Image: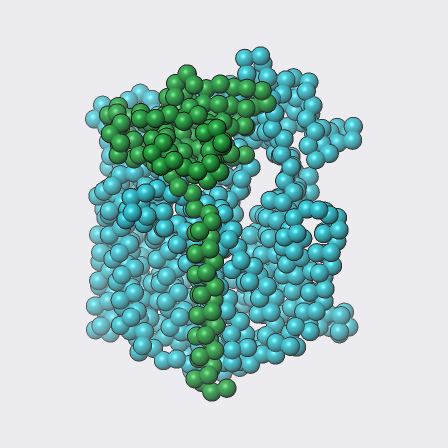
Chain colours: A cyan, B green
Amino acid sequence: MIAEAGHYALVLALALALIQSLVPLIGARLRDAALMNVARSTALAQLLFVGTSFVALVTLHVTSDFSVANVYENSHSMKPLIYKITGVWGNHEGSMLLWVLILALFGGLVAAFGNNLPLSLRAHVLAVQAWIASAFYLFILMTSNPFLRIANPPIEGRDLNPVLQDIGLAVHPPMLYLGYVGFSISFSFAIAALLEGRIDAAWARWVRPWTLVAWIFLTLGIAMGSYWAYYELGWGGWWFWDPVENASLMPWLGGTALLHSALVMEKRNALKVWTILLSILTFSLSLLGTFLVRSGVITSVHAFANDPTRGVFILLILCLFIGGSLSLFAGRATALKQGGLFAPISREGALVLNNLLLTVACAVVLFGTLYPLAMEVLADFKMSVGPPFYNLSFVPLFVLLLLAVPFGPMLAWKRGDLLGVTQRLLAAGVAGLVVIAIVWAWTRGGSALAPLAIGLGVFVIAGAVTDLAERTGAFRLPFATALQRARGLPRSAWGAVFAHAGLGVALIGIVCETTWNSEYIATMRPNDVAQVAGYDLKLDGLFQRQGPNYREMIARFDVSRDGEALSTMTPSKRSFTTRGSSTTEAALLTRGASQLYVSLGDTTAEGAIAVRIYHKPLVLLIWWGPVLMAFGGMLSLSDRRLRVGAPKPARAKQSLQPAE
Amino acid sequence: MTRKQRRMTIIGGSLAVLALAAALVLNALRDSIVFFSTPSMVAEKHVQPGKRFRLGGLVQPGSLQRGDNLAVRFEVADGGAKLPVAYKGILPDLFREGQGVVAEGALDANGVFKADAVLAKHDETYMPKDVADALKKQGHWKDDYGAKPPATTAQGNSQGAVR
């Protein structure tokens, strides 16, 4: 009954989405406010019905109703409750349902809180949103229905893939989808602007908060996914340049570029056409990501199902939306008026450079992701493009970007003074150089690149701090005045400082982890001691334990340093009987920002066990960086300007004057 | 600066960045792509020792030998040819004899494939996609690899060991 209700709710949502796709547009044509307002009600009702459908699926999973194929394939009655819930999106059908739920959520939010939008713009935005929704409802209903019943219900389910039975599954996919799908709003705004043929600075001000929300979630989602891979897969890697990771990185790069170009448009009414294009491209990359992950065309950690009909269906959606939107763009973009002149050396110029480097870096990732696919289809040979490719292509571009980051926020709008900015950044540059010298002297004989990269990270952080000091007048003005100025500084300025500093923090973490990671791999017997990076790890013994739906073998290590006992670490190997597969649960010991990492291998006949111990210096900075960036994003989101909404276009021109 | 000059500066800058990126990509492609081969393809093409590639196939049943200090040797077969593989480290949980495997590394002078990474990757039919495609192409595809249990969607599962 519940399954049928869920299915029916989804069909109703599709019907509502179809209405929402057309009626508001007709309303906008006829200038009929009532028809345009239909979009608002349908968007909210759609959210209600998709929500119902999703709750139905969750209920089926929680109650372990194995007469439903999706539950049978991905659940088990002995599975802990949390994984019964998270298992809902740990499979293809359920994750697509989560996808449309989040899409409906964003549509509902625009409907509920978009009261300051012009009526016709809101109608257009929601209509475009409904086109996307209709396509994906159809996709789910036709190829990936999660509510299908099995004729002869089995007694027990086949359990969820053990790798996914982790708290990471509760956080990573929803966050990532909030990011991916969140960019649909900027896409809908862009298409609405093209349909209406009208776009101004106010448009950018409406779009920016939505883009920012999506960007924050995507940033956190990617970071969370990377940390999950780090501790779950058992060999301490945190980024593999896997096609699916790339699929999430590309919208992030596009979205980051979009945030910056929307800034130029909002403040200076320039780069309009480019911002529209970027909105379209960013969401296209999200769709491409969905296609790559869901179609099974690539071999990856994340590959779920390779059912060709699904791949073809998503490919059709992809072509329809990307092709359609780009054609619309090509037809209408020339009609948009250009505005806001600026010199190449200026804040706008710096933001153009930022966009250029981000989009080109994104194109490089796209190339690296699709090239092996293209080669396989066209030339019929298989190859892989791995980390060395990205180290040689993506990394240099990002280094250029990082070098430029501190300069951008300090240049004036319209016409900047590069020499002056360089002088003001002298302290930051010196700080970077000093750090390079110290690190180089300290690690003599090591890699020359690592100290340089750390110096770059310090330069980026110091540059962000310098920007803050310049704006508040710290070190120049009396402390109280500086404090007052700091309080008066727009939150978005603070946001930029944190986000940019986060970039530097992440870079330092990445460099330290990859350069000074120490590794110890050996077979150990009870009472053997492993020495890694100054720590002594004594293997206490091996123990067996029964979990809810697995058996595990735990190895207990006593960790000490210089004879002083610190902690015990208990990595384990779990074997899941239902699927007959096993997972390795690494043990982590955090010391400051560094971590000790222990994971287990096979046991030998003589009672010894293979262990892998890593010491990863400053590894946590890799994820603190993105957290800082997301925090910066949230600060910027809480800026008063964004909450009070955009002023009317006539007043917008005046409010453009006080350029910060 | 006139409007035209400004525009030219920006276009020029864009082209410079694009050219730089293109140069970087071409350079990276020359040095860092890794091809996928099966043992028979290795035998046919006489791959040079030291050239990195990915080797895929089935782990020959009974060929796994464990040495001291986590050294492992096993053979990868594809029905047509076999190739000995040497690896030092912990094999992934999903590594099993008779099942699919992908190893990355290079041949040494004696014709042994020295792997520095072993990936065992399969859905519940226990075949990595790359290996399955290669075997199909050579006509060594057994139907039972492809036969899916009824009413299942293939759920991927991948693990790897990297040294």
Residue at position x 39%, y 50% from top? Answer: A369
Which x, y percent locates residue A253? Answer: 46, 58
- Which corner quadrant of the image does residue B156 belong to? top left
Query: In this rendering, does residue B126 appear at all?
Result: no
Please report the residue visible at 22 percent of the width from the left and 23 percent of the height from the top. A152
Which part of the image, by quadrant, shows the N terminus of chain A?
top left
Q: Position of residue A368 (x, y in %)?
A: 41, 51
Residue B6 lies, in percent from the top left, at 47, 81
Would you say residue A21 is visible in this rendering? yes
Horizontal side, residue A416 vs residue A114: left or right: right
Q: Is residue A396 above or below residue B9?
A: above
Position of residue A501 relative to residue A530, above or below, is below
Residue A241 placement, left or right of A327: right
Q: Nearer the viewer, residue B23 or A169?
A: B23
The residue sitting at the bottom extreme is: B2
Picture residue at 24% right of the left edge, 60% below the top: A21
Which part of the image, by quadrant, shows the C terminus of chain A?
bottom right
A160 shown above or below A390: above
User: In front: B81, or A411?
Assistant: B81
The count of marks equals: 0
Residue B74: name its quadrant: top left
Q: Left or right: A563 with respect to A510?
A: right
Q: Position of A305 compared to A636: left or right?
A: left
Q: Position of residue A71 (x, y in %)?
A: 33, 31
Q: Nearer the viewer, residue A115 or B49?
A: B49
In this orientation, which residue lies closer to the viewer: A286 or A400? A400
